[in-house]
Structures are given as structure tokens and as C-alpha cells.
Image: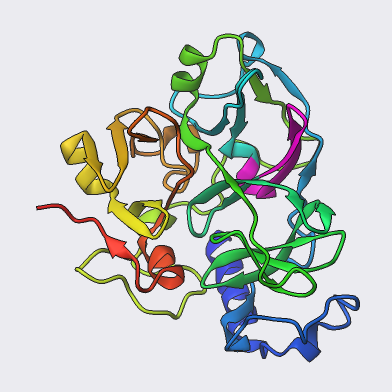
Amino acid sequence: MRKLVLAAAMVLGTSLQADPSFWVHEWPTTDFENASIDDWAEILSGGPPKDGIPAINDPSFHRVEDERDLAPLEPVITLERDGQPARAYPIRYLTWHEIVNDVVGGVPVAVTFCPLCNSGITFDRRTSAGVLTFGVSGKLRNSDMIMYDRETQSWWQQAIGRGIVGQMNGAELETLPSWMESWEVFAARNPDGLVMSEPNFQRAYGTNPYQGYDTSRQPFLYAGEVPPHGIPSLARVVRVGDRAWPLTRLAQEGQVSEAGVVISWSAGQASALDSRVIGAGRDVGNIRVRDGQGRDLPHDVMFAFSYHAFWPNGEWMLGG
């Protein structure tokens, strides 16, 4: 059944003409004349319509000691803000919702995860147009989620945090330091931390609807260039700015200090895109990215094809 759904979505995504006039009925207040899209054929339907994947607003949390469902190696996105209890946003929920609009210590944030790119990024929602609330558009570009904001109905590219269509075209969201790690690592470091509670939706939380995706040969709904240097399209890389470190190198070396950053790898985190049960996925390890003073840096652990698509002139940190 899953294969049939994916096949139907691929047919839908590739058969519809990517023309703004086709989308006006769904986006009547979006200014499609104000856009930074060179080729509208890059925009595809991922299958679900606007808000077909419902973002979460104002999530509930409970204490670490009260969590009963998360498996030890299950991945979470960690957000630690000075003076605030650390927060864990389980990938088991983000897989099905992709965006969580939250407020942490008075700062409005959007915690985002695009399963097709393995891209997990946290943004500050404050902009020149005020505080924005983000939803899932149902559109993809280079297989990456296009978000939209409910206030201006502008489209935003998740991987780069930049407005690409509408009033906010060209605007950039501030990326906040957050990272993906296993539940047991988060809980051990933050016994007084908070974990997002299960949303009130009928979803198969804890299961992966993209079983075997990160060992596939070809990304879903992607027709761009493959990465250079013989790197598989669905290999994970750690992106910091416009540089990318292959996860295989980091796993082999354990820690890398170069280009002003210190990246450490440790075993013990399940891939969210491997087995049917997320917590049983193969071990891809935990990553921390800090500067020379030990401060956490914004970064992303994404698939190589996505990095190459959005940073075609980026620097590959291959070592050796």
C-alpha cells in the first residue's frame, strides 16, 4: 500500500504543470509576481494539499521523568535556550506534522523537519512583517518542503529559511542552534527538561511512513544533479553555513575541528527513515556542532542531494 501511495504521489507531482496560475485558486492572496523562482517547473505537489500535513501550534509538554513512549534511541530535536528548561521535539511527531510553532522564553520559534531531506531546522519566527505562524504548503522544491506563513501567505524554502514567493520573498529567517539526538542522550543531560506531548491527531506516531527511504538510490520527487565526489544522494551530511561534512567521515574520525567549528559524533541514535518503527532504525549517531568557545552553532544534518541542490557551489569537507 505504501508503494502505491508513493507512486500515485509521484505521478501527481510530476504530471501537474508548475505554473502559478494553477495555484491561484488555492492561494488567492499570494503575490506570485514577487518571486525568486527561475524555473517554476521546480515546484511540485508532494501529494497532500495545503495544510494536508497539519502544523502544530502551541504544543503541550511534560517532564522527562513522565515520558513513557519514546524508545531510548528514538530521535528528537533538542532546543536549549538560556534560562529555560531544555525542550525535546520527538521526530515521531514531526514526521507527521513537519512544523511546530512554539514560544520558548518569549521567543517565537518554528521547529521544522522535512523527512524527504532529513532536514531539521529551528527558526526564529520574528520578521519585519511581525511574528509569523508557519504551515505546510504541500509543495516541494528539490524534494524539500515549502512552508508558508499564515499572515502574508508567502512561501518559504525550509532548507534555506528564505522567502521565495509573495510579500516575504527574499526575507531570511534567523536559524537558532538546535540539533537532533537520541531520546536517551537528551534525557540523561536534561533530567529536568521538557518533552513535547503527543498531538491530538489520529496518526500512527512512532512509525515511519517512509520505510527504507534513506537507503534508496533515488530521492523522492527530485530530478536535480547528484552530489559530486561519488557521494550517494541519500548520504547524510552535516551542513554548517555553506560547508558540508559527510557523516561517514565524522563517524570514522569521531571529532573534526576545522573551518572554525568543532563537530563531534557519538553512536546511539536511530535513523528516522529506516525501519517501520522509528526507534528501531539503524544507528546513524549523534552530532554536536560548536564553535571554538564551545557554543552550539546552527547547523543541519541533511541528505547530500539536498545540500548540493541548494548550495551547488558549497564546499565539501572531505578531509585527507
* In front of the other: 83 or 201: 83
Where residue 75 sits in the image (x, y, percent)?
49, 34
Residue 141: in magenta span? no
Where residue 80 sits in the image (x, y, percent)?
57, 26
| Residue in the image at 82% along x and 80% along y | 31
Q: Quadrant of the N terminus?
A: bottom right
Residue stretch rendered in magenta on the structure: 94-110
Answer above or below: position of 251 versus 155.
above
Where residue 159 sits in the image (x, y, percent)?
54, 60
Residue 98: in magenta span? yes
Looking at the rendered structure, the number of numbered marks drawn on it comes to 0
* In front of the other: 6 or 239: 239
Which image quadrant is residue 28 in?
Answer: bottom right
Where residue 177 sits in the image (x, y, percent)?
53, 38
| Residue in the image at 66% along x and 47% along y | 96
Which image quadrant is residue 295 in?
Answer: top left
| Residue in the image at 57% along x and 39% along y | 91
* In front of the other: 278 or 2: 278
* Visible residue check, residue 46: no
Which image quadrant is residue 76 in?
Answer: top right
| Residue in the image at 73% along x and 26% along y | 105
Which color scheme is applied? rainbow
* Visible residue check, residue 91: yes
Residue 83 as seen in the image, left or right of residue 224 = right
